[in-house]
Image: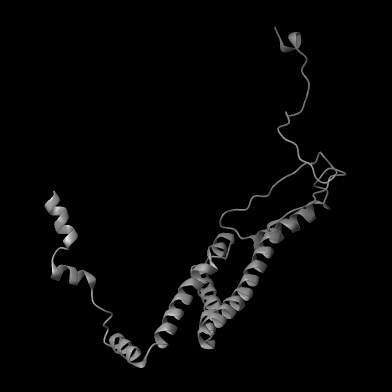
Amino acid sequence: MLIKDVAKVSVGFVPRLGIAGRDHDDDVAAAIVVMGRTQHTNDIVPRIKREVAEMNVDGTLPPGVKIVPFYDRTTLVEVTTHTVFHNLIFGCLLVFLIQWIFLGDLRSAIIVGVNIPFALLFSIIILVLRGEDANLLSIGAVDFGIIVDSAVILMENIFRNFQGDNAHGRALLEALAQQQFGTDPTQEMQSDGPSTGARACVSSM
């Protein structure tokens, strides 16, 4: 028994597994170009555009068929770069003004304000030395809050110490010059023996 005896054989189509539409056309053929992990957007996207333009005119595609790109990562890269520069400029200005208003000291505000571009410059230098490009993950990992917080806390503490009396400031500078950063609380606890609370816990057991 043959297949033709029980069925009709003909050339058909692969079963459809999905559908794509764009704008007013509810049935288009869509394709995605996947970039390798070690490749770079600024290098790959221009090459893809050249290949697409060549395929549209060299007769590779059937008559009436044309490849029309509608999205690429260059838009996302441009928006991200613009956001980084926007945050850099306005972040410096905002931190400078807030620090100047609340402390009333111009030098302290300038030191904290310039900390942001120097921190970003240092991050970029490290990326260049490691041979890595700035991508969405590395750019997003640069948190302005982490950069500014430590500088603000240190500057406010230094400014507070300078506002104290001359004797206290002089004693603090002498202690720092002699590498005396204060007494070690663990040494005091060892010299005094166990605390009262510790003795009470031992006796209750």
Q: Quadrant of residue 62?
A: top right
Q: How is the image coloured?
A: one colour
Residue 184 position (above or below residue 108):
above
> Which image quarter is the N terminus in?
top right
Residue found at x 63% / y 74%? 90
- Is 68 positioned to the left or the right of 39 in the image? right
Give me the residue at 84% from left, 45% from top: 65
Give the residue furthest to the top.
1
| Residue 146 place in picture, x, y as percent | 49, 68
Q: Is residue 22 above or below residue 193?
A: above
Which residue occupies 83% across, 46% down?
Answer: 23
In the image: residue 69, left or right of residue 81: right
The residue lying toward the viewer, choosing from 78 and 204, is: 204
* Residue 117 horizontal/vertical position (percent): 56, 77
Q: How many discs appear? A: 0
- With 115 as the anchor, is 160 left or right in this view? left
Camera-side residue of 90 and 49: 90
User: Where in the figure is residue 77, as x and y percent of width and height?
Assistant: 66, 62
Q: Relative to 138, does residue 55 appear above or below in the rendering?
A: above
| Residue 16: image location, x then y, percent | 73, 31
- Choose top left, top right, bottom left or bottom right for residue 99: bottom right
Quick check: can you spot residue 116?
A: yes
Residues 127 and 82: in front is 82
Q: Does residue 126 appear in the picture of this structure?
A: no
Q: Residue furthest right?
A: 64
